[in-house]
Amino acid sequence: MIKSMTAFADGEITVENLTVQCELRSVNHRYSDVSVKLPERLRFVEADVRRLIADKLKRGKIECSLSYKKQTGNQEFAVNDEMVEKLLQATGRIEALMQAPQSFSALDVLAFPGVQQETETDKEALRASIIGLLDATLEKMLANRVREGAQLAVLISDRCQKIAQLVDSARLRMPEVLLAVRNKLISRIEEVVAEPNQDRLEQELVLLAQKLDVDEELDRLQTHVIEVQRALAQAEPIGRRLDFLMQEMNREANTLGSKAADREMTQISIDLKVLIEQMREQIQNIE
């Protein structure tokens, strides 16, 4: 089971008079890169948030955004009585120094900084609720990553089958290629030499056949295809392993192209490299 690194998920939860919202975004990245955005009031949960994300997501660039809004329906106003008394005492002294008293309303007093007090939320209860919200949102993101990963697995498996077919075609083609090269070389030698040295000619043909032999490259391509298909069935992250296999498969396809002795073998090499590049692009999104 493979997982894509590209996904989005969100959720929210209500804790006392706060509605906390969580958004998660992830894109492909070579390693694990977690960034957390949260308001100062929720800063105390940052370490827990980072730890939980790291436990669930092993690779990718992950952005976690936490925010909150106050509920106004049942909001109660808490007044700092001590602050109000000090404020009234201060205004009394000021009015005594002025020629005429200045009128002000209770709303003016409430608007003064520090008079209104926010109802404190139990931090431990808030922490537990946020962790629960994040865990649920992560599960949604993981489900999205698994679903997209399954689609990527189908695309990669399909290209593996096409590569295997090209490898089989190359194996079937090679005896004809070697025979054609042999006949062409013999024909050219006979044009310039009336009685060629057959022993020397056979030696040259053997050396040429060794230079054109691609059995080793085809064997390795076949082995890599089997390994890719085996990796697709694993549960742990396989993105880096698949990326390495793509490098090795591309190396073999290049060697096959450099040894190609006719148009058909050259075309097989090109088709292999196209398929490998298509796989490599998809694998960039796999965890």
Image (cartoon, rainbow, N blue to C red):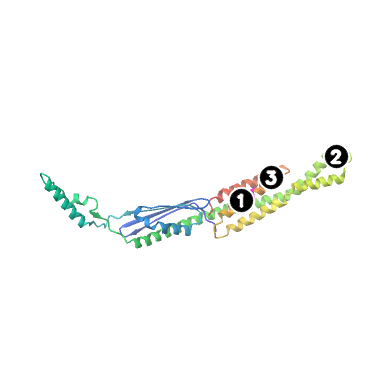
Query: Looking at numbered disc 2 in the image, what kind of residue is underneath it?
Result: Glu
Q: Amino acid at mark 1?
A: Met
Q: Secondary structure at mark 1?
A: helix
The range drawn in magenta is 243-250
Q: Position of residue 247 (x, y in %)?
A: 62, 49
Query: Mark 1: few, some, or many residues within 10 Å (few <14, many ≥20)?
Result: many
Q: Which residue is mark 3?
A: 257
Mark identifier at residue 190: 2
Q: Indicate left or right for 178 with 252 as reference.
A: right
Specify whether residue 199 is in view: yes
Helix, strand, or loop for circle 2?
helix
Q: Is residue 187 left or right of residue 227?
A: right
Percent of width and height locating residue 54: 47, 57
Task: Tell me: 147 left or right of 172.
Answer: left
Left/right of residue 151 with respect to residue 49 in the rendered view: right
Task: Judge the density around disc 2: few (<14), some (14-19), many (≥20) Cα neighbours within 10 Å.
Answer: few
Report the residue at 78% width, 43% height from top.
Answer: 181
Q: Main secondary structure of the magenta part?
A: helix
Question: Where's the N terminus, which quadrant?
Answer: bottom right
Q: Residue 232 location, x and y as percent?
A: 58, 57
Residue 103 appears in the rendering: no
User: Does dot 3 land on a helix, a strand or a loop?
Assistant: helix
Q: Percent x, y for residue 160?
A: 62, 52
N-terminal of the pair, mark 3 or mark 1, is: 1
The residue lying furthest to the left in this view is 99
Say if mark 2 contacts mark 1, CB within 8 Å. no
On residue 246, which mark appears? 1
